[in-house]
Amino acid sequence: MGCRKICKLEGINWNMMSTREEISEELLLEEETVQQNEIVLFNDEVNTFDHVINTLMSVCEHSPEQAEQCSLIVHYKGKCTVKTGEYEELKPQCSKLLQAGLSAEIV
C-alpha cells in the first residue's frame, strides 16, 4: 500500500504534508548556502595552556572544558577550529586572539 493510501486512511492531508516537506527542504537549502567561516587556532611554543584557555573563554565565550579541550587539540594536532560563523562576526574575535599573542586566522 502506497504512502498516499496509508495517509488517506489515517486521515492525514497528503497535500499539506507535501507542502510542509517542500518548505523544510527549501529552508535546509538556504541554511546550507550560508557561507560559514572558521577561526583556526595554531600551536606555538610561546603561550601557556592557562593563557590560551583564558583567552578562548573571554574572546570566544568557550566554557572552561571547551577551552581546555581546544588547547589540547592545538598542542597535539597543531591546530584547531575554535569558532565558526559568518566572516564579519568572526573578524573581531580573531583580532582579539591575535592581540592576545595567539596565532589564528579565519578560513
Image (spheres, rainbow, N blue to C red):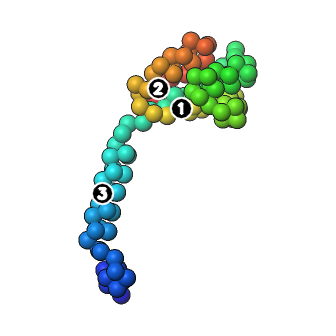
Left or right relative to 24: residue 41: right
Check the image and report above or below for 51 versus 80: above
Label 2 to label 3, Cα distance in Å? 30 Å
Residue denoted by label 2: 90
Q: Position of residue 56 (x, y in %)?
A: 62, 25
Observer-side mark, 3 or 1, equals 3
Label 1 crowd bin: few (<14), some (14–19), many (20+), radius 10 Å: some
Residue 17: in sight, yes or no?
yes
Q: Name the residue at 61% across, 17% down.
A: 102
Residue denoted by label 1: 83
Q: Earlier in the sequence, mark 1 or mark 2?
A: 1
Q: Position of residue 24 (x, y in %)?
A: 34, 57
Q: Position of residue 18 (x, y in %)?
A: 29, 68
Q: Which mark is residue 23?
A: 3
Q: Name the residue at 42% across, 36% down.
A: 36
Disc 1 marks a residue whose amino acid type is Lys
Q: Earlier in the sequence, mark 2 or mark 3?
A: 3
